Image: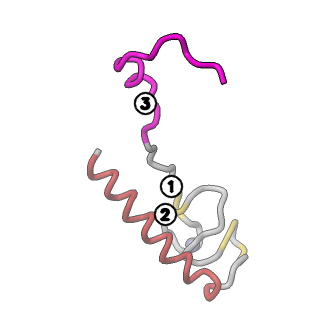
């Protein structure tokens, strides 16, 4: 494989890595239960999408825990700035 002629400087590496920042996801309010959810996705809390029930609440219990974890992470990131 081809090798680079010169190594990149620490400054160049830092400029490149400055784009790898985690972004806070855009959240909207669910029309049904008013929980904060990701746009264009079925609500993880009530299973509704655009006013229709898509998933039964039983099938999303595991996902509810996941959604809560994501929520906590988002709040942590927001606190840190
Ligand atoms: Zn909902």
> As drawn, which residue projects farthest toward the top?
5
Residue denoted by label 2:
36
The answer to whether residue 52 is magenta is no
Q: Quadrant of residue 75?
A: bottom left
Residue 44 in picture, x, y percent from top left: 57, 72
Q: Quadrant of ligand 1?
A: bottom right
Q: Which mark is residue 11?
A: none
Residue denoted by label 1:
27
Q: Residues within 10 Å of mark 1 (few under 14, many from 20)?
A: few
Determine if the C-beta at disc 3 is less than 8 A from ligand 1. Answer: no
| Residues shaded magenta | 1-21
Classify 11 as above or below 42. above
Q: Are marks 2 and 1 in contact (CB under 8 Å)?
A: yes
Please tell me whether the stretch drawn in magenta is mainly helix, strand or loop.
loop
- Quarter of the rendering occupied by the C terminus: top left
Q: Quadrant of residue 50?
A: bottom right
Q: Which structural element holds mark 3?
A: helix
Disc 3 to disc 2, C-alpha distance? 31 Å
Residue 10 in picture, x, y percent from top left: 35, 20
Residue denoted by label 3:
17
Q: Earlier in the sequence, mark 2 or mark 1?
A: 1
Identify which residue is drawn at 50% across, 72% down. Answer: 66
Identify which residue is drawn at 43% across, 30% down. Answer: 17
Disc 2 to disc 1, C-alpha distance? 6 Å
Classify 80 as above or below 2. below
Residue 57 in picture, x, y percent from top left: 61, 85
Identify which residue is drawn at 68% across, 68% down. Answer: 49
Q: Residues within 10 Å of mark 2 (few under 14, many from 20)?
A: some
Q: Are marks 3 and 2 in contact (CB under 8 Å)?
A: no
């Amino acid at each position: 494989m081809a090798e680079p002629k010169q190594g990149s400087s620490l400054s160049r590496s830092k400029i490149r890595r400055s784009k790898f920042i985690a972004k806070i996801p855009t959240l909207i309010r669910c029309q049904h239960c008013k929980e904060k959810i990701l746009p264009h996705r079925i609500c993880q809390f009530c299973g509704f999408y655009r006013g229709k029930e898509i998933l039964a609440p039983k099938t999303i219990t595991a996902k509810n825990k996941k959604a809560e974890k994501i929520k906590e992470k988002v709040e942590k990131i927001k606190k840190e700035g």
